[in-house]
Image (cartoon, rainbow, N blue to C red):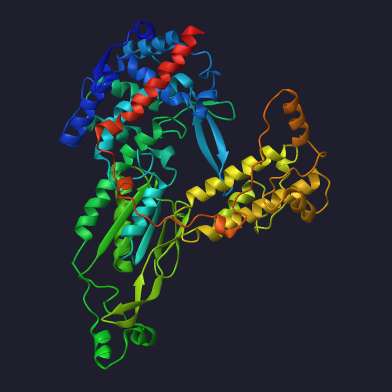
């Protein structure tokens, strides 16, 4: 019934009911892999003619919170139907579709500044998702392995794992941050890059109109934008990667020309003392010498990683080399009308200062250990990369959530005063579990997460003391336990769990236990994850794996429309 109503065509592949457009997308993906950057794609608009891609796009964006966020007209996923979907498809195909105005809002960042965010209409998000599915299969196979932002099977963790594995030989580090990147993407350059691989005029025209959509500012005035891809759009991250792929290509070419030598030359003075009978550890501590030259002009290395508009270049060479690379990168960015942030872009000595990247503090310490050689125990030294949780960043995040003051001292979080103990603990638990998951690679994971949990627990304990009129933290912990998961009081300010429990029992609803505030003890925090997962740093090549998600979203969209059809 649903199939005929949608006028969709299907093929059977391997016993699985698969929409026809999957076969077309597989052809596009296969060509992108085989032909690399030489092949130009045309007749892509025929994929949009298949209703199945619209159902898959609808299924994908329906699971996002943004589906219920209204734009200027107030339109959300509520009230949409199969007929509405087919009307949008028809408008796109006959060229009568017009992008709506984008609502501009500002969200506060931890440092106090504001980030602009665009809220497009729901129909615009749907059309963007359809375009994204097509473009991703064209460009994703050829993106750099050093690019980790907004890509399948890649994340902040894959970027940081790559840093820990390959950046050990760094002497100088360039911390790069492109100034207001999403607001300064040049439309003409972006469209020129798209035309290199796409020669479907209808699709390019649709993208061009979307880039030049009008923006409703918070002040109430509508402005036309001539540059930028507003953050908040479904298509913006992919377009950003297409734009910055040029930077990836440039730096990788620079990397090949910069790399020199196979092994560092030995330090002759070091071995002179060693022949005199001195131990290597004595030479290192007394004369500050190593067995090889720190800056060997015949041995140079360059390492690179990028996540969205943040990137890091590590130089295995001198400060002069780092300055030269910085100048070349800055000059290249000017050719694509971008510039580095003067305050956030730094050249750092890896041996003396830490580097901040993706919320982690990165250092290059030397560790001393004992090595058994031919039955004899000898002192040894080697360099490692240490990923750490910056306590200052934890403090700023908890300060923004009202759990502590700027010094990191816990304070009663009265934002939760009128909430139940269950809801308060659940939100605190979600915050701590999220921090623990994000900082799973940190060497000081246990110390950092325990520190955050301490601040949160005592902040809530002080708040509960006021809520239940207990007047001291000691009484709160005595009643609620160290995890604050026991009922603390039966009366107080705002909603009380005891009252809700009685209400649930009266209606036969099974009451749920109050969640624990986790990581109260050091041993409860998991150990750091030191593993390097090679499969996480590579783009998926297996077509069955790639299209598994598309099939899943198609099935989801089908279920939604079917439930509305029979209701």
**Could you tell me residue 204's position as x and y percent?**
29, 24
Q: Is residue 558 left or right of residue 567?
A: left
The residue at 30%/32% (across/down) is 546
Asked if residue 87 is positioned above or below residue 553 in the image, the reply reads: above
The residue at 46%/35% (across/down) is 231
**Could you tell me residue 398's position as x and y percent?**
62, 50
Closer-to-camera residue (17/457): 17
**Could you tell me residue 326's position as x and y percent?**
33, 58
Closer-to-camera residue (88/459): 459
Q: Which residue appears farthest toward the bottom when viewing the image?
A: 276
The residue at 39%/14% (across/down) is 97
Asked if residue 292 is positioned above or below residue 435 in the image, the reply reads: below
The part of the image, by quadrant, that contains residue 298 is bottom left
The residue at 33%/64% (across/down) is 168
**Could you tell me residue 162's position as x and y percent?**
34, 54
The part of the image, by quadrant, that contains residue 1 is top left
Q: Residue 186: in sight, yes or no? A: no
Closer-to-camera residue (525/293): 525
Asked if residue 398 is positioned above or below residue 195 in the image, the reply reads: below
The part of the image, by quadrant, that contains residue 407 is bottom right
């Amino acid at each position: 019934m649903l199939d005929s109503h949608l006028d969709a065509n299907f093929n059977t592949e391997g016993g699985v009911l698969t929409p026809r457009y999957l076969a077309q997308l597989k052809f596009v993906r296969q060509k992108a892999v085989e032909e690399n950057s030489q092949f130009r794609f045309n007749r892509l608009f025929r994929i949009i003619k298949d209703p199945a891609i619209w159902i898959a796009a609808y299924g994908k964006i329906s699971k996002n919170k943004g589906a219920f966020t209204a734009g200027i007209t107030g339109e959300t996923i509520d009230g949409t139907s199969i007929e509405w979907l087919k009307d949008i498809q028809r408008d796109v195909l006959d060229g009568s579709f017009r992008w709506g105005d984008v609502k501009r809002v500002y969200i506060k960042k931890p440092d106090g500044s504001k980030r602009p965010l665009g809220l497009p209409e729901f129909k615009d998000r749907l059309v963007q998702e359809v375009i994204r599915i097509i473009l991703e299969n064209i460009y994703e196979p050829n993106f750099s392995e050093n690019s980790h932002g907004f890509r399948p099977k890649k994340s902040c963790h894959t970027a940081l794992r790559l840093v820990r594995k390959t950046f050990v030989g760094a002497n100088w580090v360039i911390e790069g941050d492109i100034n207001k990147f999403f607001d300064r993407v040049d439309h003409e350059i972006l469209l020129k890059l798209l035309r290199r691989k796409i020669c479907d005029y209808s699709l390019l025209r649709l993208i061009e109109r979307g880039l030049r959509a009008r923006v409703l500012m918070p002040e109430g005035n509508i402005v036309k934008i001539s540059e930028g891809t507003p953050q908040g759009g479904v298509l913006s991250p992919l377009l950003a990667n297409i734009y910055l792929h040029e930077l990836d290509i440039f730096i990788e070419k620079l990397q090949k020309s910069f790399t020199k030598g196979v092994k560092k030359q030995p330090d002759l003075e070091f071995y002179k003392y060693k022949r005199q009978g001195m131990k290597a550890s004595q030479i290192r501590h007394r004369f500050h010498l190593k067995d090889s030259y720190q800056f060997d002009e015949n041995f140079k290395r360059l390492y690179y990683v990028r996540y969205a508009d943040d990137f890091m270049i590590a130089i295995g060479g001198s400060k002069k080399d780092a300055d030269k690379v910085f100048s070349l990168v800055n000059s290249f960015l000017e050719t694509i009308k971008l510039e580095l942030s003067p305050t956030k872009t730094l050249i750092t000595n890896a041996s003396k200062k830490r580097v901040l990247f993706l919320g982690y503090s990165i250092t290059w310490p030397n560790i001393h250990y004992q090595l058994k050689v031919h039955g004899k125990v000898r002192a040894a030294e080697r360099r490692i990369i240490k990923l750490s949780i910056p306590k200052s960043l934890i403090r700023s995040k908890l300060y923004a959530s009202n759990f502590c003051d700027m010094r990191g001292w816990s304070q009663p979080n009265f934002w939760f005063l009128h909430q139940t103990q269950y809801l308060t603990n659940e939100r605190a638990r979600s915050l701590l579990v999220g921090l623990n998951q994000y900082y799973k690679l940190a060497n000081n994971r246990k110390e950092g997460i325990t520190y955050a949990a301490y601040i949160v627990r005592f902040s809530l304990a002080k708040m509960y003391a006021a809520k239940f009129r207990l007047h001291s933290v000691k009484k709160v912990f005595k009643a609620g336990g160290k995890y604050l998961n026991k009922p603390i009081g039966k009366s107080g300010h705002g909603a009380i769990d005891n009252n809700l429990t009685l209400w649930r029992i009266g209606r036969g609803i099974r009451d749920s236990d109050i969640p624990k505030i986790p990581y109260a003890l050091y041993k409860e925090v998991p150990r750091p994850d030191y593993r390097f997962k090679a499969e996480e740093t590579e783009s998926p090549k297996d077509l069955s794996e790639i299209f598994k998600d598309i099939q899943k979203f198609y099935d989801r969209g089908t279920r939604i429309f079917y439930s509305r059809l029979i209701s």
